Image (cartoon, coloured by chain):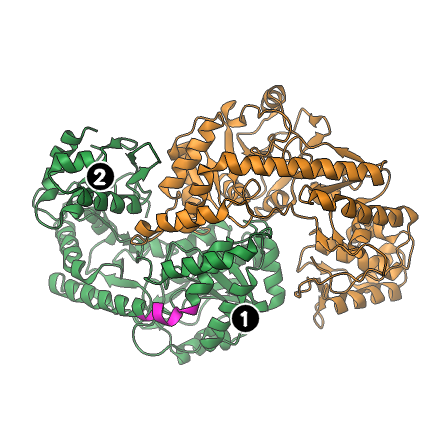
Chain colours: A green, B orange
Amino acid sequence: MHSDRLADLLAPWLVGGRAYAGVAAGIRGLALDGRLSVGARVPSERQLAAALGVSRTTVTAAYDVLRSEGYLASAAGAGSRVTLPSSAPVRPDADPGEPTVVRDLTVAASPAPAQLLDAVAAATADLRPLLAGHGLHPYGLPALRTAVAAHLSGRGLPTEPEQVLVTNGALAAWDLLLRTVTRPGQRALVEQPTYPAALDAVAANHLRPVALPVGVEGWELPVAAAHVALVTPDGQNPTGLLADDAQRRALLAALDVPVVAADETFAELVLDGARPTPLAALDRRVVTLGSMSKAYWSGLRVGWVRADPSLLARLAQVRGTVDLSSPVLEQLVAVRLLAVADEVLADRVAWLTAARDALLAALAARLPDWRAVRPRAGSMLWVLLPGQSSTRLAAHALDLGLRVTPGPRFTVDGTADRWLRLPLSVPPELADEVAAVLQAAWERTVAGTDSRRIPSRWTA
Amino acid sequence: MHSDRLADLLAPWLVGGRAYAGVAAGIRGLALDGRLSVGARVPSERQLAAALGVSRTTVTAAYDVLRSEGYLASAAGAGSRVTLPSSAPVRPDADPGEPTVVRDLTVAASPAPAQLLDAVAAATADLRPLLAGHGLHPYGLPALRTAVAAHLSGRGLPTEPEQVLVTNGALAAWDLLLRTVTRPGQRALVEQPTYPAALDAVAANHLRPVALPVGVEGWELPVAAAHVALVTPDGQNPTGLLADDAQRRALLAALDVPVVAADETFAELVLDGARPTPLAALDRRVVTLGSMSKAYWSGLRVGWVRADPSLLARLAQVRGTVDLSSPVLEQLVAVRLLAVADEVLADRVAWLTAARDALLAALAARLPDWRAVRPRAGSMLWVLLPGQSSTRLAAHALDLGLRVTPGPRFTVDGTADRWLRLPLSVPPELADEVAAVLQAAWERTVAGTDSRRIPSRWTA
């Protein structure tokens, strides 16, 4: 697209705010509404800067943002072309004067920690002596198994490196466990609500999901028997509950399940109070799943399973049917980040606490009838909508540029349509802006103006 | 495992030597090469003794040895199950004067290319602008999708970035495809022989494997109908065959299969002659699987699927049930390595060609009766042993410090016991040393002497 034409199209976005953000928002919006087609080449930074009458630095910053978001792709010598991230909203066709934020709130999307680049530099040096080897370590690099064992031991769960298998995240660990210990048709007990990918993995393994209800007060007992279970007492996703030791013991006593997976993805993100006893320290049936993805960065795909060595050997063998091994460099970065975990986690907890408090305050101000479960751990907020469908709300929000996941996505049976999950990834200074979009979507929902077609590409 | 089936598998070990040592060596070998899975229950001593026609004392002694070595674990009242020793191998206890090489020839274990550290440094710089994002890219980083598309296009398969999904390797891509397009009980056509992990993935997805025989001259047609197929015309693993265009067309015409996966892991490692037409350029049913793991480094866990965008969207959705996304830094390293692919691949092909020629010459000198299929592509060598069991040879080689994978591991039905796979990862200067160990193992196999104690800590 010619620079002058693009400059004309960008004009509406360049009112107020920082110029680079306006340029980025404009190109993003044009890509999303189809006026800039996927694959179209955008002008060079110099050309666009001239056409807009801004500095080249402004356009460079805008293109960097767009590349990081997946809206631009650059190939050496071939300029930059428009792409679409797969999670992009369909089209945020807000009316003039309405909020124009384009924001994906279906994932808790934290930026990388400040310590990451130092960890990468150190890991690159650590990589050098490993280059002569073949790079396949079915259980994980010894250095990472040792670091994870020390990390878990330090959190009150004595662990030997021989009990640790490195995976590509907690979800990969859950899927691997299901592959290893179940057969099609068996029953898998999952919390209700739980995170959508956990349910998807149950379905992909041809298991029958059985709900373990979680209310605002906690896990509702007794529960049905099953072959395997997944629980998240350390920052329940999406409710943000943190089980105390009494709740843990009651839950374990109620579980008529031979293999219990405890997903501790959020265990290091306790926002209020101290961390209770790790579930695996209370019961030998418990297999602990962990991940770097929420407490550190989702762009790191490193997680682990802690299990007794005989189960671990079976998991390692099944891992050989999936993807053999985790990347070496990635594991070395994880070792270095775990070495500065206290620092990273203190930053994360402070950030999430501020985000939580700002979002709760903004919702209370604009949507006083909504009821949120105040999360004690994790990076999610679970909100009850008074008497309306979150599916309809989500469709209206999408029209307004905000992508959110409605409650039914978190349940075995498609219930919970009065609930909505929001992530604690909204910067505090944007909390009111997000709340304003939700308020506008809510007003449309309540007014029953639901004649809009629900976008066909809705998949969240 | 049923006692009669285990007795059949153990037969090759029971020639000569003490019977209990043969039973122990057999179970150890079957556990190490994966035919007995970890966690599998072995028959009771009484049952196995009856099936083998030996005394119960013999089986008791064998199980005692295996328990002491860590290959069997027994729980009171629950029988014995296969395990693998968790401690790392050190070295087998060869007698003085015998070959002392300790070498794992079950994987083609190349060191990293010289260009890797530069690629990591460049990727670290590329990472900086992505740190503000959440790091999840279900289809892969746009930069890598673009680079893979350009790479495939340059090899004669016109590809758009929108046709590319990044995975954690070709095996992960095959597993993902099976998850996406099959249901338990359906038929999956696989080459016979094929690589063991491909068969394991078929089993893990609860599919019925159907053999597509591959002889020394090529793919044996016609073949049975199936729901999905995996073929490797670009460096068949383990035979090293490279299908010419006529063979490709004949194979495609014979395939009564709606989805055909072509694993191109070895496609860039053509050792003799030019590369034929990519299979996907000949037939719209073909889904191309690729990987950095053999042509670049196995410590990189990056691969891809090329498919039409509608299938790709389904694959991406299923990917969300497995591990969400590939690591960002790893993908950036892949982009940088693909940019210098010509240089990396020229080094690799030269190295493999030298390794192949040295190994073929050493085998011809020391074992002139063996018949190797001269590989035209890839990093494997498929060898026919005249009239003896490769399973027994592998057990003797293990005694001498060399771990190799016997032929039955590559077949659907446990045939091919006269075949052996060797990798082209033996440095040329060590080829004669490896051939000498194989010669010694061969002499023991032919002599039927099986009296050596097998080293207790050997697991590599």
Residue under label 2: A453
Find residue B265 and report its horizontal and vertical position in percent.
Answer: 56, 38
Residue displayed at 75% across by 52% down: B402
Q: The magenta stretch spans which residues?
A: A339-346
- For the residue marked with disc 1, what is the amino acid? Arg
Query: Relative to residue A20, is residue A120 depicted above or below?
Result: below
Discs 2, 1 touching: Cβ within 8 Å: no
Label 1 is found on which chain of the structure?
A
Subunit bearing disc 2: A
Q: Residue type at mark 2?
A: Arg
Does the magenta-highlighted stretch encompass residue A340? yes
Furthest residue in direction top, as rendered: B246
Tell me the element at label 2. Answer: loop
Residue B403 to residue A85: above or below: below
Could you tell me which residue is drawn at 33 percent across and 42 percent down?
Answer: A86
| Residue ID for mark 1 | A285
Q: In the drawing, does residue A215 fall left or right of residue A127?
A: left
Whole-number angstrom distance, CA of label 2 to CA of label 1: 48 Å
Please identify the quarter of the rendering in which residue B69 is found: bottom right
